[in-house]
Image: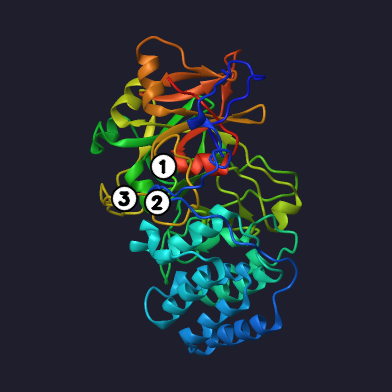
Amino acid sequence: MAGTSDTDLPGAEATADPARLDPRERGALRNFLGYEFPPAPAAPSGPIDQAAVDILEVIWAGFEVGGFDGGLVAGLGNTGDARLGWIMSDLLRFFYFGDIRDGSISAFEKLTGVRVADDPVAERSSWQSVTDHLIAWDLPAFPRYAEYKERLLTLVEPRWQPFFDDPEAAIDWRLVSWGGVYIDDRELGDQRDCPRGCIPALDDPDVTDATGGSWYSDDGIVFAVVINGEARAYPRHMMEIHEMVNDTLGGRRIGMPYCTLCGSAQAYFTDDVPDGVATPVLRTSGLLSRSNKVMYDLVTKSVFDTFTGEAVTGPLREQGVVLKQATVVTTTWGEWKAAHPDTTILAEDGGIGRRYPLDPLRGRDDDGPIFPIGDADDTLGVHDQIFGVVYSGTPVAFPVDDAAATLKSGRDVELAGVTLQLDGGGVRAVDSDGNEIEGHQAFWFAWSQFMPDTLLWQP
């Protein structure tokens, strides 16, 4: 996990503070409410028993015809194979109450020795608690588990099928879950609503100059990008609706995913791909991986790791595509336009005649992550905002509020060769020669789980 430091890197300081050590090195794994996960159960290797296969086949047939009971599910608890806990997780994602839910919990508890009710997260979601345990333990899946996942998820959304068609996919299907919406597979520029409901990307939005952006409050939050001297601000409340923008800025084609669950807005150059590869069109799949949105390319149906820009399935994985990033500065509209008077901002209606509520999430994340994340590094609060970069292969994170306050006081903020600078009320990073190091903000829980061994600056 995050929080360790490396004295061999320039600017890194040695520390003996145990609070900054990997939680596994401290001998405890805890969730974001402080619950300590018990030791992981033993997991066998090799295929699951035929008796378990027979039960799973009946359950999966029941999905297709609409009928099976919780007693059948509970019977999986008699197999003694803790790896079947991942099946319990998948069932609990879709059955919130009733005998199937009860049977899933019973089987999970018998297989693992855990009493789910001991975890305070279970008070709001048994599925979240069960899955948090499995992620924290890094419990292996059994062979062919991905096949069961495929059969289940493609019943929910058949248009996810291409994601499973790559036998060399670098995706961990244990961590993938349904986000509660369906795939956005509208063609580029199609701004009609998805018939079944999706998180709709905004393509090539209309923009206005700073004066024309008077519709937006000066204290409204924006995600701001500068490419080749051209600046643009993307209001957060609009990004909370679309979670994805495909745009042209500074003569470059970019895709901007915003994972509301991770508090992370990123900007990827989609025009920097190998010869012969069409410019990707980024879309939201409706799936999540450890609470991070799963984005994909509409053209090739290749899935990306949203946090890193690496293609993990499909033709783009075969081509070794890793999208490069531009810095995203998170700040207020008032501070941004004061620092960048030539900036543009999205038009109030996005160019599609839509009305946007100013607070569409309405405090959704106030009580912590609402999807499974496993164990949480408690060096910082799960929803504390950090500005993170990867420099010379090393992830480096800076708590935003502390870093900005330090810079405003006239002191330097530097770690491992990365120096922060203020920009329009937000921050960006440079190296010792003043060259920009691409970065973005994110919730601490997200950065620390997707960027292990992060160096953490502290004031």
Q: Secondary structure at mark 3?
A: loop
Disc 3 packing (10 Å; few <14; some 14–19; many ≥20): few
Mark 3 to mark 1: distance in Å?
10 Å
* 233 or 457, nearer to the observer: 457
Circle on res. 382: 1
Sequence-earlier tag: 3 or 1: 3
Sequence-earlier tag: 2 or 1: 2
Asked if the residue at tag 2 contacts the one at tag 3, i.e. Cβ–Cβ closer than 8 Å, the answer is no
Asked if the residue at tag 1 contacts the one at tag 2, i.e. Cβ–Cβ closer than 8 Å, the answer is yes
Q: Secondary structure at mark 1?
A: loop
Answer with left or right where residue 379 lies relative to residue 312: left
Q: Amino acid at mark 2?
A: Pro
Please state, as top left, top right, bottom left or bottom right, where the C terminus lies in the image: top left
Q: Which residue is mark 3?
A: 367
Q: Amino acid at mark 3?
A: Asp
Q: Which residue is mark 2?
A: 369
Please state, as top left, top right, bottom left or bottom right, where the N terminus lies in the image: top right
Mark 3 to mark 2: distance in Å?
7 Å
